[in-house]
Amino acid sequence: MRIAVLASGNGSNFAAIADYFQKESVAAEIAFVFSDKKNAFVLERAQKIGVATFQFSPQDFPSKNDYEKALLALMQQEKIDLIVLAGYMRIIGPQLLAAFPKKIINIHPSLLPAFPGLNGIKDAYDYGVKVTGVTVHYIDAGVDTGPIIAQVPVLILDDDLASLEAKIHQAEHQLYPAVLKQIVQGQQ
Ligand code: GAR
């Protein structure tokens, strides 16, 4: 199975997935990492461990539709079976969705449907909930919607925002690779 990882930033989830796949001999290859952001650290991380990278942005194209078309062409050219969003901060357009039904997975740093959007951790913290967490789900046309595959709770105790972020990321790095392994093995 050939996987494409799409990410916009730091890439700690990508690193956790790549590490786990290697250690656990998961029968899947991360064919490449794509980022919509030129200077995303995830690109450095990928290059360091010998994973191919691609980078382009909607601004490089006349329209958002053309950007999506290029992304879809990249997936087809690289014979991708599964798209894994790991901090990819954009909505997936209709063309890509139609071409990869139930084949695009996302991780979100809250217990969806609570606190969707760009700031799931901070929004939960600011609200004052005592339990938040991490969600892995299939992508549909909405923002952080789509059928839920797995969730883990994270308790907010005497945390500040930074310590909560660290706890959430730790939970993500455990949950996401394990769920992806199940998907690769056809168990989800
Ligand atoms: C992760 O916390 C992920 O859940 C979140 O972006 C972060 C990326 O971290 N995604 C979303 O908020 C999607 N709406 P990373 O680049 O270190 O993997």
Image: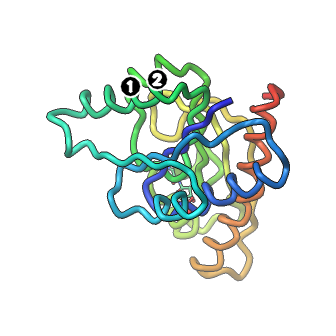
Q: What residue type is labelled 2?
A: Gln
Q: What residue type is labelled 1?
A: Ala
Q: Residue tagged by mark 1?
A: 73
Label 2 crowding class (10 Å Cα cut-off): few <14, some 14-19, many 20+?
few
Q: Are marks 2 and 1 in contact (CB under 8 Å)?
A: yes
Q: Residue tagged by mark 2?
A: 76
List x then y, in percent, for residue 53.
46, 49
Q: How is the image coloured?
A: rainbow
Viewer-side residue, 143 vs 130: 143
- Quarter of the image for residue 45 reads bottom right
For the C terminus, give its image quadrant: top right
Left or right: 125 in relation to 23: left
Q: Which residue lies furthest to the left in this view?
A: 62
The residues bearing labels 2 and 1 have C-alpha atoms spaced at a distance of: 5 Å
For the N terminus, give its image quadrant: top right
Left or right: 156 in relation to 8: right
Viewer-side residue, 65 vs 131: 65
Q: Is mark 2 on a helix, strand or loop?
A: helix
Viewer-side residue, 155 vs 35: 35
